[in-house]
Amino acid sequence: MEGINMWWKLVKNHSNFFMVLSGHRYSPVIPRRIGHGDAGNKVYELLVDFQGEPNGGDGWFVLMEFRPDGNIYVDTYSPYLDEYKNAVDKYGYNCRFLIDTKRGAFLIP
């Protein structure tokens, strides 16, 4: 099922969805947005796809730390390069941010 069909037929119809991770469209950063389900629930949408990086993606993966206060810390790390990704694109998207679920916002920590 294509992503747009997943949204219209599944995600937006159920109030228990709060996050969607997708890929298969290369980006050196993590584009993101906040959608809203039919029940008014916020759905944090993140695009993660580093396959266009050198060496088939340089081993980049996303770490998410879910904290008891509702915050979700997002970071991107490559064990191959032994470094955290600090890329920023022309729209201000990056690879290290905080999802503040109480305020319904993406923040730079």
Image: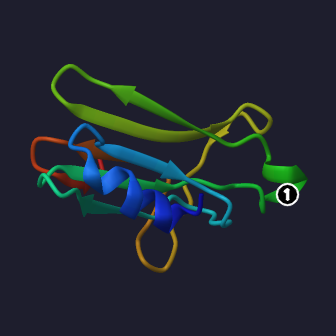
Rendered location of residue 70, percent (x, y): 19, 30
Taking 37 as reference, is 10 left or right? right
Give the residue displayed 38% in from the left and 51% down from the top: 10
Q: For the residue carrying disc 1, how many other residues have a C-alpha within 10 Å: few (<14), some (14-19), or many (20+)?
A: few
Give the residue displayed 51% in from the left and 58% down from the top: 30
Image quadrant where one finds the N terminus = bottom right
Q: Can residue 96 be seen in this view?
A: no
Rendered location of residue 20, percent (x, y): 42, 48
Q: Which colour scheme is used?
A: rainbow
Image quadrant where one finds the C terminus = top left
Depth order, front residue of 41/51: 41
Depth order, front residue of 78/105: 105
Rendered location of residue 100, percent (x, y): 20, 44
79 versus 1 height, above or below? above
Depth order, front residue of 67/33: 33
Give the residue displayed 89% in from the left and 51% down from the top: 55
The image quadrant that residue 105 belongs to is bottom left
Outermost residue toward the top in this view: 68
Rendered location of residue 82, percent (x, y): 72, 33
Depth order, front residue of 100/20: 20
The image quadrant that residue 73 belongs to is top left
